[in-house]
Amino acid sequence: MAEIIQEEKSKGGKRRPKKGNPHMDMTPMVDLMCLLLTFFMLTTAFSKPKVMDIVLPEKIKKNEKVDPPKIADSRTLNIIVGPEGRVFWYPGKADQEMPLQETDFSDAGIRKVLIDRNRALLDKIEQLKADVISGKLEIKQDSLQNAIKELKKDDDTGPIVLIKFSEKAKYKNFVDIIDEMSIVGIARYIVVDINYIEQTMLDTALKNKPSVAAAQK
């Protein structure tokens, strides 16, 4: 802040300014700089990038012969993310005569479907955590996470989820379905392209049951 120039009276009654060198007080600016520096340091520390684990199929080289993995139909769960956030699923192999079952991203939607099919593994994980909490099993936090990973690795009863997206699916729904895999603890899932039969099944499902927005047009 600039210094205020004071006035003093002379003998004749006239006022004349008091001589002095004006200067700027920088103390408030230093305080403001410290506050801004503290603010940016805190916000930068809290804003950390989020990492999402995504399982993608390995690229097959040209003219390379690769036998497709053998997956039991009873363990296979196919999820198709359609337009406008609609979610469809079916078990086993694709069949044009098989109707797709529709659900959503709510707790009672696709998450319940995944939990029901992954119940055996979830029970093992919950029992392991209960043993640690009760003291029956003495194990460190890092060792507990490693033990859970081993349970997922050795699991041979849980579902193998194949995630597929239509051309009109939104990126937000891609993040949502990957989050559901993490929340439910699905040990094996993969993102693959939708094939012709599944696209036909999806078109039939959308035609038989249009969305609310499409029905209002």
Image (spheres, rainbow, N blue to C red):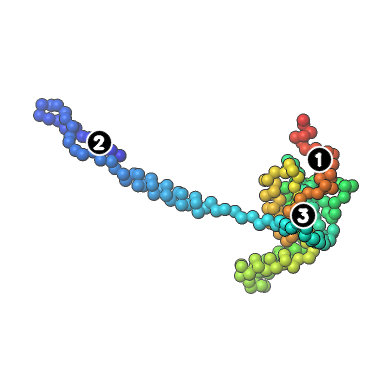
Quarter of the figure with the C terminus: top right
Q: Whole-percent x and y of residue 42?
A: 48, 52
The reply to whether dot 1 and dot 2 touch (C-beta < 8 Å) is no
Q: CA distance from mark 2 to mark 3?
A: 76 Å
Q: Amino acid at mark 2?
A: Ile
Q: Amino acid at mark 1?
A: Leu
Q: Is residue 127 visible?
A: no
The reply to whether dot 1 and dot 3 touch (C-beta < 8 Å) is no
- For this orientation, the residue located farthest to the left is 11
Residue indicated by mark 2: 4
Q: Residue at x 42, y 49 (%)?
A: 37
Q: Is residue 31 visible?
A: yes
**Element at label 3:** strand
- Circle on res. 189: none
Q: Whole-percent x and y of residue 85?
A: 73, 43
| Front: mark 2 or 3 | 3
Residue indicated by mark 3: 162
Q: Whole-percent x and y of residue 179?
A: 68, 53
Q: CA distance from mark 1 to mark 2?
A: 77 Å
Residue indicated by mark 1: 206
**Element at label 2:** loop
